[in-house]
Image (tube, grey):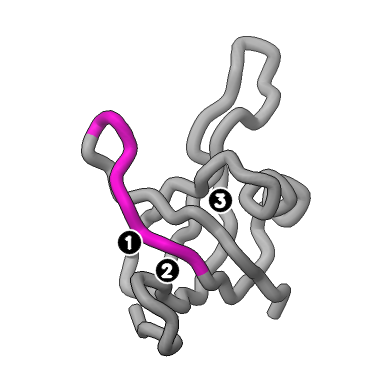
Amino acid sequence: MKNNGRPNEVILKGIITVADWDEDCNVTAIYLSTPDEKEYLVGNNDKGEELFHYITRNVKVIGIIGEDKYGKEKITVNEYKLL
């Protein structure tokens, strides 16, 4: 995890993976899975929702880390780039 010079933002690289499905097998949540085996739930803002199209793809993400209501680490994506 690196800070890119902007307050509270980090740069992470990893693979987009499925975090959850609904009863019809539609993906409802995704993770950014990093090489150090950490999983960050991807927030549901516009940029995060765009990443649903890139499951199994390598990406570089710039965003802010926080926690979801269950204490799981979550990233709110501000920018991303496909690798």
Q: Amino acid at mark 3?
A: Thr
Numbered mark located on residue 34 in the image:
2
Magenta region includes residue 68: yes
Residue tagged 3: 17
Q: Amino acid at mark 2?
A: Thr
Q: Amino acid at mark 1?
A: Lys
Q: In this view, which residue lies farthest toward the right?
A: 53
Q: Residue at x 58, y 25 (%)?
A: 21
Q: Secondary structure at mark 3?
A: strand
Q: Residue at x 28, y 42 (%)?
A: 72
Residue tagged 1: 38
Name the N-terminal-most of marks 2 and 3: 3
Quadrant of the drawing holding the C terminus: bottom right
x%, y% of residue 7?
37, 76
Q: Count residues near mark 3 (Cα–Cα under 10 Å), then give few for <14, some for 14-19, many for 20+.
A: many
Q: Main secondary structure of the magenta part?
A: strand
